[in-house]
């Protein structure tokens, strides 16, 4: 069944159709009140969330459908040791579509390959968060008026911030995008995103630690929270947590047309005083997230009716290819085969199909 696991599962044309549908929904909500009558969405949230889960639920209600699910792992059978594959097979008997958030990277992919209904990745560990990216794209499209010819500054925790990983993967396919990566040394963008997204697609990028220096160049400033829950070392989190705080003084150096986005929740990386600035778009972004999720549910349910399938991935199983990422779903689900995809045949580079960790075989 067609699912959304990674933002690159959708072509640029498909993303444009979603943007158009989301804009139409926001202008003509009455047209859609019965669009999902009789359909059910399950929200399986094994990790905390406010916006993502509630915007999915609000989206389904506004389409006339129903919602069931849970918001913490402890209230599901995962706490008894049920596998993701079994959970997905069983849920396929109860609902028409499901959204999954999970701390283990690759968990939604495992669900999608076992379910007989569409699966939506609502965030997997530090890996990716494609539906947030769809909301981000809609916001930039509406606020800046375009998705090409932009200078985008991504600021904060670029190592663990999954929203940035998905956003950059999406922008790799738009023309003339310049990226300024603003982070402390310890929280720089993972190499796999740098090499296999930015460099592979020839995107212009620079890395800096200075928000002040980047500010005057930006069309979009994408702020992120330092991801406390993904740190192994609490002292390191304490040391880095206030690396960047956006204030009205810093905003003064930005263009009048610049927009500030943040997937939220904010901790203290944006002063509340910035909220009054018309360039602060993060609460409008949260509203766009609901429209985008409505458009997404409509698309995936329609494709399920048409019998559209996920593209099958060419995978390799080899005893030398074992994923050693402790955050990968294969580290806890012992039954899962370790499967890799060959991403660079010349240099013998493989990536885990669940979490994209790298392995080299020569
Ligand atoms: C983000 C997430 O969960 O990755 N939040 C969201 O979905 N809106 C960002 C974050 O938690 O910092």
Image (tube, helix red, strand yellow):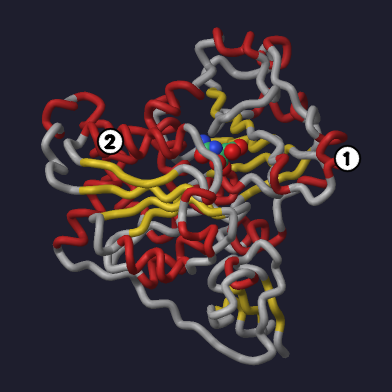
Residue depicted at x 25% and y 63%: 93
Residue located beneath label 1 in the image: 235
Task: State the residue in front, 327 or 68.
Answer: 68
Q: Quadrant of residue 330?
A: bottom right
Q: Residue at x 42, y 39 (%)?
A: 53
Q: Position of residue 187 (x, y in %)?
A: 77, 45
- Location of ligand 1 given as a quarter of the image: top right
User: Dot 2: what SS?
Assistant: helix
Tell me the residue at 22%/32% (across/down).
Answer: 62
Q: Which residue lies furthest to the front in this view?
A: 80
**Percent position of residue 279, x then y:** 53, 16
Going by the image, does 103 lie left or right of 173? right
Q: Is mark 1 on a helix, strand or loop?
A: helix
Which residue matches tag 2? 22
Instruction: Note whether ligand 1 is within 8 Å of mark 1.
Output: no
Q: Position of residue 301 (x, y in %)?
A: 21, 54
For marks 1 and 2, the one nearer the N-term is: 2
- Whether residue 174 can be seen here: no
Quarter of the image for the C terminus: give it: bottom right
């Amino acid at each position: 069944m067609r699912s959304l696991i990674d933002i690159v599962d959708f072509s640029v044309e498909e993303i444009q159709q979603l943007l158009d549908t989301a804009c139409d929904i926001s202008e003509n909500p009455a047209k859609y009140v019965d669009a999902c009558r009789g359909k059910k969405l399950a929200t399986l949230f094994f990790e905390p969330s406010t916006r993502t889960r509630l915007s999915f639920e609000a989206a389904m209600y506004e389409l006339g459908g129903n919602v069931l699910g849970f918001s913490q792992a402890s209230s599901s059978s995962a706490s008894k040791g049920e596998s993701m594959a079994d959970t997905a097979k069983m849920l396929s008997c109860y609902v028409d579509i499901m959204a999954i958030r999970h701390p283990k990277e690759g968990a939604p992919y495992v669900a999608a390959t076992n379910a007989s209904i569409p699966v939506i990745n609502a965030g997997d560990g530090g890996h990716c968060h494609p539906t947030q990216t769809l909301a981000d794209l809609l916001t930039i499209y509406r606020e800046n008026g375009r998705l090409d010819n932009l200078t985008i500054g991504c600021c904060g925790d670029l190592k663990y911030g999954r929203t940035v990983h998905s956003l950059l993967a999406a922008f790799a396919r738009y023309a003339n995008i310049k990226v300024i990566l603003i982070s402390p040394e310890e929280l720089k963008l993972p190499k796999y995103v740098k090499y296999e997204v930015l460099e592979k697609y020839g995107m212009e990028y620079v890395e800096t630690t200075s928000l002040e220096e980047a500010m005057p160049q930006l069309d979009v400033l994408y702020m992120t929270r330092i991801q406390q829950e993904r740190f192994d070392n609490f002292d390191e989190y304490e040391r880095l947590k206030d690396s960047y705080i956006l204030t009205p003084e810093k905003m003064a150096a930005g263009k009048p047309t610049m927009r500030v986005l943040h997937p939220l929740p904010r901790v203290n990386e944006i002063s509340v005083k910035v909220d009054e600035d018309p360039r602060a778009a993060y609460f409008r972004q949260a509203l766009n997230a609901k429209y985008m999720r409505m458009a997404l549910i409509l698309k995936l349910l329609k494709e399920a009716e048409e019998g559209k399938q996920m593209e099958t991935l060419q995978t390799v199983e080899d005893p030398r290819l074992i994923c050693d990422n402790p955050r990968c779903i294969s580290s806890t689900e012992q039954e899962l085969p370790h499967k890799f995809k060959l991403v660079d045949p010349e240099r013998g580079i493989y990536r885990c199909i669940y979490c994209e960790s790298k392995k080299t075989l020569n």
